[in-house]
Image (cartoon, helix red, strand yellow):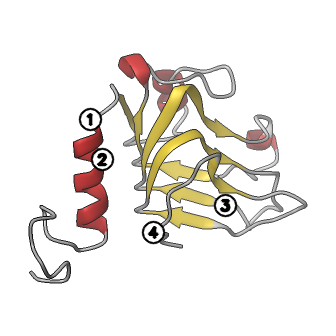
Amino acid sequence: MQNYFAYAGTGMKNDFNGHDNHHHDNLYGYIGGGMGVCGALPGHADKFFGNKIVLLGAGHYASYDCKCNTTGTCPEMHDNQIYVQGGEFPSTCGQTLAQRQAQGIDLGSAAHPLPSDDEIIMWARELLELPATAGSSNPYAQ
């Protein structure tokens, strides 16, 4: 699912036995958490990849059943760009990003310091295929 929304709480979320929720190539700006999902049945994992996540404060990147590796129900997560105050990856399931990636989780994902508001606005304009600046009288002009 590709969204064009600004989130205030959590980006991707599901509960009450939700599953097969796919979020990719989105911009989640100024949120408290990137994703928070419940457990899924084997073969029905949620997917969260290719996203830019700008966290408020310390924020949290992901919340899900950390024992899912024993049941094969972990969400598929990779290639996310996480922007957080100080640029340090917020611990997920008690692990650093390097520890997660050593286990094959979140490959291609990286943590970065917070971008400027102007940079976030530029990303949003690119995602929505709007001109790079707001100076155009026609927002749909190429």
Mark 2 is surrounded, within 10 Å at the Cα level, by few (under 14), some (14 to 19) or many (20 or more) other residues, namely: some
Q: Amino acid at mark 3?
A: Asp
Q: Which residue is mark 4?
A: 4
Identity, as a three-letter code, of the amino acid under mark 1: Ser
Q: Residues within 10 Å of mark 3 (few under 14, many from 20)?
A: many
Q: Are marks 1 and 3 in contact (CB under 8 Å)?
A: no
Give the farthest residue toward the right. 16
Query: Helix or strand or loop: what does disc 3 sit on?
Result: loop
Q: Nearer the viewer, residue 65 or 127?
A: 127
Camera-side residue of 46 and 62: 62
Q: Residue at x 26, y 35 (%)?
A: 116
> Quick check: 13 left or right of 126?
right
Gap in angstroms between the C-alphas marked 2 and 1:
7 Å
Which residue, as the protein is rendered here, is positioned at the far front?
137
- Height in image: 53 above or below 135? above
Which residue is at 70% across, 69% downward? Answer: 20
Where residue 77 appears, as percent x and y from the top left, is 54, 49
Give the alpha-carbon distance from disc 4 to disc 3, as whole Å.
19 Å
Amino acid under disc 2: Ile
Q: Give the residue type that dot 4 points to.
A: Tyr
Name the image quarter holding residue 58: top right
Residue drawn 9% across and 81% down?
A: 142
Give the residue at mark 3. Answer: 46
State the separation of the CA atoms marked 1 and 4: 20 Å
Q: Which residue is mark 1?
A: 116
Dot 2 falls on a residue whose secondary structure is: helix
Residue position marked by numbered label 2 in the rendering: 120
Q: CA distance from mark 2 to mark 4?
A: 13 Å
